[in-house]
Image (cartoon, rainbow, N blue to C red):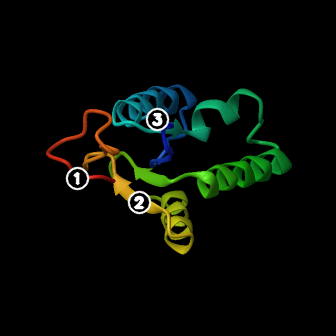
Amino acid sequence: MKRPLAYITAPWSNSQYENAENAANYCRQVYDAGYSPVCPVLFLPTFLKDEIPQEHKDGMDMAHDYLCRSHVLVVCGHGIDETMKNDIATAERLRITATALDGNLTVKGQGRGKGGGHHA
């Protein structure tokens, strides 16, 4: 079965190392729940220079495009920042399901979600 795309949003820090570590953990949990995780913070910094305004804008545009192609938005971490608010608003406008990572993420019997047969 093809795994639905799940876009990962979180209150990312200024530390690329900390973000990569947290993002990898979130992606693993989403993968285990039966989704294909999409987490731009894991790969965009490998080739974009955020301090260059045009590349920062391009990164934001690419992340938005990935969110628009996803089937679900997974909200991770503690607290909500402006980027997360924008991601949630975009998902709502496009009728993309939004769920918290600590919620039930089992998809059609795949994965190891918490609880019974609920689906994200």
For image coordinates 58% across by 32% down, the residue present is 42
What residue is pinned by disc 1?
A: 118
For image coordinates 85% across by 50% down, the residue present is 54
Left or right of 89, for residue 69? right
Mark 1 element type: loop
Left or right of 28, for residue 60? right
Of residues 62 and 117, the one drawn nearer to the viewer in this rendering: 117
Q: Where residue 104 appears, x then y in whole percent?
A: 25, 48
What residue is pinned by disc 3?
A: 1
Front disc: 1 or 2: 1
Q: What amino acid type should be assigned to the residue bearing mark 3?
A: Met
Q: Where residue 82 appears, x then y in whole percent?
A: 52, 62
Q: What amino acid type should be assigned to the residue bearing mark 2?
A: Ala
Front disc: 2 or 3: 3
Q: Where residue 110 appears, x then y in whole percent?
A: 32, 36
For image coordinates 41% across by 60% down, the residue present is 98
Front disc: 1 or 3: 3
Of residues 86 and 3, the one drawn nearer to the viewer in this rendering: 3
Quadrant assignment, res 55:
top right
| Residue at the bottom extreme of this rendering | 93
The alpha-carbon separation of the residues under discs 1 and 3 comes to: 18 Å
| On screen, residue 27 above or below 107 | above
Q: What amino acid type should be assigned to the residue bearing mark 1?
A: His
Q: Which badge, 1 or 3, is on the more N-terminal residue?
A: 3
What residue is pinned by disc 2?
A: 98
Q: Which badge, 1 or 2, is on the more N-terminal residue?
A: 2
Classed neighbour count for the residue bearing mark 1: other residues with Cα under 10 Å, few (<14), some (14–19), many (≥20): few
Left or right of 34, for residue 102? left
